[in-house]
Image (spheres, rainbow, N blue to C red):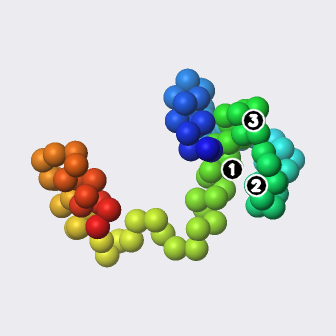
Amino acid sequence: DLLALLHQHGPSTEGIFRLAAGERASRELREALDSGAEVDLESQPAHLLAVILKDFLRKIPSKLLEAELYEEWMSALQRTSRQERLAGLKE
């Protein structure tokens, strides 16, 4: 849901990933999400959603894109059709 809202509202929000949201608001939203509470993300400002996403990505223990797979990713991106590229990236 968070990604869908950022996809929808992010491009029209100036400084979406540069501007910070309030520390208290981000802490409260993060705690609510972590506890599994029902959260109405649509009522939250786009900047706050971006802060929550960035915080989540920073806390992932391993890297999303491993350096050892660089050549394989570049090779997948060189494939001709979109479907082949997606299949290569999924591998």
Q: Which mark is residue 91?
A: none
The residue that mark 1 highlights is 52
Q: Which residue is mark 3?
A: 44
Q: Nearer the viewer, mark 2 or mark 1?
A: 2
Q: Which residue is mark 2?
A: 33
Whether the residues at callouts 2 and 3 have beta carbons within 8 Å, the answer is no
For the point 16% across and 46% down, which residue is it? 81
Percent x, y of residue 91: 29, 67
Q: Is residue 77 visible?
A: no
Q: Are marks 1 and 3 in contact (CB under 8 Å)?
A: no
Which residue appears at 66% of the width and 56% of the height? 55
Q: Position of residue 14 (x, y in %)?
A: 59, 26
Q: Could one spot residue 72 in this view of the protein?
A: yes
Q: What amino acid type is highlighted by mark number 3?
A: Gln
The Cα atoms of the two marked residues, 1 and 3, are separated by 11 Å
User: Considering depth in this image, is 17 or 25 the residue closer to the camera?
Assistant: 25
Place of residue 7 in the rendered image (x, y in percent of width and height, measured from the top left): 52, 35
| Kind of residue at badge 1 | Ile
Q: Identify which residue, 33 or 76, lies in the foreground.
A: 33
Query: How would you rate the neighbour count of disc 2 (Cα within 10 Å): few for under 14, some for 14-19, many for 20 or more?
Result: some
Q: CA distance from mark 2 to mark 3?
A: 13 Å
**Which residue is most to the front?**
38
Q: Are marks 2 and 1 in contact (CB under 8 Å)?
A: yes
Q: Residue at x 81, y 54 (%)?
A: 37
Helix, strand or loop at mark 1: helix
